[in-house]
Image: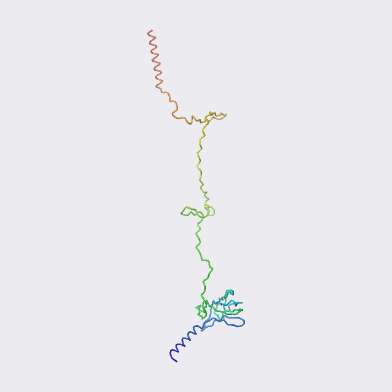
């Protein structure tokens, strides 16, 4: 055998060993089994496998087999069934899950996840699927800031509800300032000119002087000027001069 042929055969052997890991469907006891076929000794600790099938096939029941436990979901209308199993102990099995079906039974196996006892990924010759990201989870959002009651923004507009002073905060209740309207000036009532004020006197009461229009309009300069004492002296001197003259005339007669 030539050297080239030997290398070729060794390459084929390595390829066959590498591709020996596979998930297959085995039949037995009126049930189908998802079975791991290993090229070398490997223990499967966990798996995530999906069966795809045509519309004329219906999955009737499915369950992980011991020592595996897990969950499954059957969507016959969509044409697929998902099985997820794992083991928390040190026991393993080549048969991972069992199921029953009706119809044609044309299946294809999609392997999403497969782990060995060391939690390492196990590569198989089946179609490898990509685990979809979880959807439907609400995106966390930052809550809008809600200012406390009575908060006044820098623009001068009050936000929030009507401010409450005191109350549950333990602060003294401060009354809100209220604006007091300025008193409007009352126009004076002019007394009637056709009637002279005649205050009525009542026993035990003092007559209240009535303000008349003349009193209100009288100028302070309208008061009579007091008589000058020089005028009185002139009159007295005139009288004395006349008396002396009259006396001298009578003396010469």
Q: Position of residue 20 (x, y in %)?
A: 51, 83
Q: Quadrant of the C terminus?
A: top left
Q: Is residue 200 above or below residue 183?
A: above
Q: Is residue 193 left or right of residue 235?
A: right
Q: Nearer the viewer, residue 60 or 105?
A: 105
When the figure is inspected, residue 148 is found, relative to residue 34, above or below; the finding is above
Quadrant position of the N terminus in the picture: bottom left
Name of the residue lying farthest toward the top: 253
Q: How many marks?
A: 0
Quarter of the image holding residue 219?
Answer: top left
Residue 32 on image: x %, y %: 59, 81
Q: Position of residue 217 (x, y in %)?
A: 47, 31
Q: Nearer the viewer, residue 3 or 55?
A: 55
- Rendering colour mode: rainbow
Query: Where residue 182 sits: x, y (%)?
Result: 50, 42
216 w.r.t. 28: above or below: above
């Amino acid at each position: 055998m030539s050297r080239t042929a030997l290398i070729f055969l060794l390459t084929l052997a390595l390829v066959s060993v590498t591709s020996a890991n596979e998930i297959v469907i085995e039949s037995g006891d009126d049930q189908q089994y998802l079975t791991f076929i290993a090229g070398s000794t490997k223990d499967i600790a966990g798996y995530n496998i999906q069966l795809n099938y045509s519309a004329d096939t219906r999955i009737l029941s499915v369950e992980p087999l011991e020592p595996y436990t897990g969950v499954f979901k059957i969507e016959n209308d969509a044409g697929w069934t998902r099985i997820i199993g794992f083991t928390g102990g040190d026991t393993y099995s080549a048969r991972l899950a069992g199921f029953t079906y009706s119809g044609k039974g044309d299946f294809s196996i999609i392997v999403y996840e497969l782990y060995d006892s060391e939690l390492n990924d196990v590569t198989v010759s089946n179609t490898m699927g990509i685990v979809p990201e979880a959807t439907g989870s609400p995106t966390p959002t930052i809550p809008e800031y809600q200012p406390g009651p009575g908060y006044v923004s820098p623009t001068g507009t009050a936000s929030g509800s009507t401010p409450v002073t005191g109350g549950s905060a333990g602060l003294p209740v401060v009354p809100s300032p209220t604006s007091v309207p300025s008193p409007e000036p009352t126009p004076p009532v002019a007394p009637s000119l056709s009637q002279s004020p005649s205050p009525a006197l009542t026993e035990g009461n003092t007559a209240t002087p009535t303000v008349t229009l003349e009193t209100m309009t009288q100028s302070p300069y309208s008061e009579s000027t007091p008589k000058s004492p020089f005028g009185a002296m002139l009159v007295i001197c005139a009288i004395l001069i006349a008396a002396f003259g009259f006396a001298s005339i009578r003396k010469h007669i």
